[in-house]
Image (cartoon, rainbow, N blue to C red):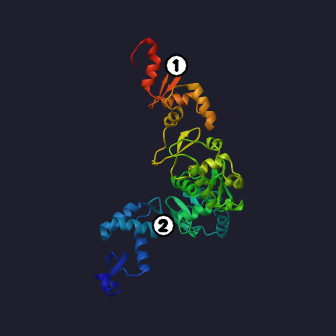
């Protein structure tokens, strides 16, 4: 009703948060008066938590807690760091300080503590606060500092990692934050980052420089999918040995490591956690990676094998380095069985018992 009549008709009715919540009092209904009101409240809670501030506003002004938490955390970021109010701030007055900071603090995004350390290197006496960061052109987002010129963290991270032809794995992994790891993983899935070896990524910009496009990569991956069989394990080596060919390989001239990482980006591909990349295209993809025992079972078939011969041939065929110790560790947890008496690996325990005890005349 009040919204329909028009808030401006009521001199003491203040849309202090948003139109769904109002405060009746002496505060004028304009941006400057609202700002003075909130900053006055913040001054009362300087050095205390945002939670205490929100509790006060809820108790004294009946402003809903979730709305206040969101509104204050967004509108007054320069005064909040890690949910603590910081109002007693003295900004540097030396223009030379700001000129130096333009040189050393210039990346699109930083972990907050890293940016604070850079500031302290320039001037150890400086009080590092969100308000100072704001004056330096940064805003805090989820314990990260982002240049205010970017609309989102996603835009900032793309500018940080994709501006050059290449970026080191070390730089991508330099941020101890799960969000960064998740973004790197997704950029690789989208082929904006292509791992060309264990130390470097090639960016989409770098790909274009060598004449390779994302559609080229998509066609290559479709060729792989057309060549392999569903639910059959393979490696890059076994794929090539089986006769797989692609014009993309001559065009891109990437390393084996890069081709393995590209295959990894296929949505239905799952990998076995072992030394070397063992892939399987699951006809019914599951979130979990398949166990190593499934791979052993595929290669073993229905016959028993001497375990040393089996592993030697397995490693040669697929270009792996599965050790005897690793194999025995996994065999103890699955359906396959191993007999120390015969030194053989079996499809199941029953066939192992039959082979081990048949000479004793025991009916397994």
Residue 274 at x, y percent in the picture: 56, 38
| Residue 247 falls left or right of residue 40 | right
Outermost left residue: 1
**Number of other residues with Cα within 10 Å of mark 2, as a class: few under 14, some 14 to 19, many 20 or more:** some
Say above or below: 308 vs 232. above
- Where residue 113 sits in the image (x, y, percent)? 56, 55
Disc sitting over residue 342 in the figure: 1
Where does label 2 land, which residue?
77
Residue at 68 percent across and 56 percent down: it is 166
Is 286 situated left or right of 176 in this image? Answer: left
Q: Is residue 188 visible?
A: yes
Q: Earlier in the sequence, mark 2 or mark 1?
A: 2
Where is 125 relative to 292, above or below? below
Residue depicted at 32% across the width and 76% down the height: 23
Distance between the Cα atoms at labels 2 and 1? 70 Å
Nearest the viewer among 10 and 309 is 309
The N terminus sits in image quarter: bottom left
Residue at (35%, 86%) from the top-left corner?
A: 8
Q: Secondary structure under badge 1?
A: loop
Residue 139 percent location from the top left of the image: 53, 66
């Amino acid at each position: 009703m009040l919204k329909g009549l028009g808030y401006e008709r009521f001199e003491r009715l203040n849309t202090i948060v948003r139109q769904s919540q109002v405060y009746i009092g002496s505060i004028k209904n304009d941006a400057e008066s609202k700002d003075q009101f909130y900053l006055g409240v913040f001054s009362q809670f300087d050095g205390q938590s945002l939670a205490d501030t929100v509790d006060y506003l809820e108790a004294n002004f009946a402003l809903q807690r979730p709305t206040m938490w969101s509104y204050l955390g967004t509108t007054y970021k320069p005064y909040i760091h890690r949910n603590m109010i910081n109002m007693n701030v003295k900004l540097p007055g030396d223009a030379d300080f700001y000129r130096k900071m333009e040189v050393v603090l210039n990346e699109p995004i930083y972990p907050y503590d890293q940016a604070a350390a850079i500031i302290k290197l320039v001037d150890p006496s400086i009080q590092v606060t969100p308000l100072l960061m704001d004056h330096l052109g940064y805003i805090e987002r989820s314990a990260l500092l982002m240049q205010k010129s970017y609309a989102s963290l996603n835009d900032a991270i793309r500018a940080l990692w994709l501006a050059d032809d290449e970026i080191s794995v070390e730089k991508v992994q330099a941020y101890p934050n799960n969000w960064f790891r998740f973004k790197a993983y997704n950029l690789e899935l989208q082929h904006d980052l292509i791992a060309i070896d264990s130390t470097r990524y090639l960016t989409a910009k770098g790909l274009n420089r060598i004449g390779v496009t994302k559609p080229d990569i998509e066609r290559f991956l479709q060729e792989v999918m057309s060549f392999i069989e569903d639910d059959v394990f393979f490696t890059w080596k076994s794929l090539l040995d089986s006769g797989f060919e692609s014009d993309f390989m001559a065009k891109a001239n990437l390393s084996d490591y890069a081709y393995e990482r590209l295959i990894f980006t296929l949505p239905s591909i799952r990998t076995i956690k072992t030394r070397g990349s063992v892939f399987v295209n699951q006809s019914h993809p599951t979130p979990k990676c398949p166990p190593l025992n499934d791979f052993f079972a595929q290669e073993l078939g229905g016959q028993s094998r001497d375990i040393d011969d089996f592993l030697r041939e397995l490693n040669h065929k697929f270009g792996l380095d599965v050790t005897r110790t690793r194999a025995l560790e996994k065999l103890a947890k699955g359906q396959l069985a191993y007999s120390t008496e015969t030194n053989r690996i079996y499809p199941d325990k029953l066939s192992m018992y039959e082979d081990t005890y048949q000479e004793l005349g025991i009916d397994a």
